[in-house]
Image (cartoon, grey):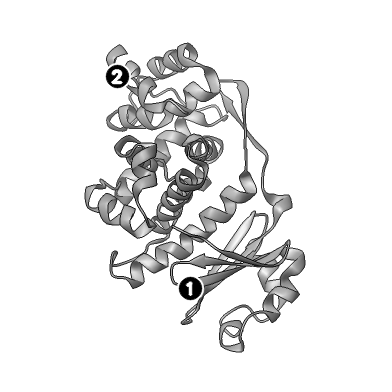
Amino acid sequence: MIWSALALSASLFWTDIGSKQALVCEVPSLPSCLHELPSSVRRQLPADFSEFHQMLGQRGALVMVVEDLNIAGLILTSPENIPGSLSVNVSGAIVSLPLENQPQMTLWHEMGHLQAKVLQDSGLIDELTPYMHEWLADCYLAWRVAKEKKSLGLVWQQYHRRNIDVMQSIDTMSHWTVPVLSQLLSRYSLQKLIEFETFSDLMSDFLPRLAAEDPKSLIEFSSLLHRTFSTQVLQPLPNYMFWRKADLGRYLEPTLIKLLGERAAEFWLRERKMLLGNDVFTEQVTYQAEP
């Protein structure tokens, strides 16, 4: 697989999206960026710069899909809004996760949104819900990391980031791609991911095997996450959403081990009845190991 990026400047360049290209630019380069687009594409984008800034808000990047034979879309990045680390309150203790290569990771995620549209246009998927957009984008990121970095370390970083985000606030549930990333990481080794020549090849193999969480399940996970990590004083309900606890514990365990260490993570999970037994814990430690 060969990728190309035609650099017009350090903050403005074209990158491949399947058979098309996307224009990537940082916020300060937006005027020059828009001049690179044909009028037929420009008409599909906001009419003035203030609309771009409003849509971007405090996020690190924004992707806009367009309909064109040669151009897939525009990716607008705001490097100053891309975090270098994340912190979260776990049982009264503030723990942090440094984030490596985050500008590149952010770009690959946004490119993944455009790749999701490619999958839909090819007929591999019938519809694209907002949540599907997010987990497909993170699956693309995982495949791209494997191909270029020859390591799964940054994929696990994305996994941990998604968990920490929802531990901080359930407002980020729309981006909680962990239920899908968990299956991707358990099904494919680094070598297997590298062997898929294209992202479409990977998704052709993965999608029929994927057990996706339905909207009701995600709502229940959201409620359990809020009760588990809220810093507000809540009435103790030890059996609250008990039918979701084991699955949530399985999703959180790799991140808790990363943040707290194995012993503290095991204690935390057992105390909240999210761990079924030592055998499950041992299996999950092996599963979460990062290269």
Query: Which residue type carries mark 2?
Result: Val
Q: Which quarter of the figure has residue 123?
A: bottom left
Name the residue at 27% across, 56% down: 204
Circle on res. 150: none
Q: Is residue 98 left or right of residue 18?
A: right
Residue occupying the far right of the picture: 28
- Residue 160: in sight, yes or no? no
Q: Is residue 177 left or right of residue 247?
A: right
Asked whether 148 or 94 is in front, the reply is: 148
Position above or below: 287 against 65: above
**Which label's residue is closer to the chain start, 2 or 1?**
1
Q: Residue 168: image x %, image y %?
A: 56, 36
Query: Which residue type carries mark 1?
Result: Lys
Asked whether 119 or 255 is in front, the reply is: 119
Q: Which quarter of the figure has residue 49?
A: bottom right
Task: Name the residue tied to disc 1.
Answer: 20
Q: Residue 205: image x %, image y %?
A: 26, 52
Task: Name the residue tied to disc 2.
Answer: 280
Position above or below: 221 against 252: below
Residue occupying the far left of the picture: 208
Position above or below: 285 against 252: above
Name the residue at 67% across, 70% down: 52
Q: Nearer the viewer, mark 2 or mark 1?
A: 1
Asked whether 117 or 234 is in front, the reply is: 117
Q: Secondary structure at mark 2?
A: helix
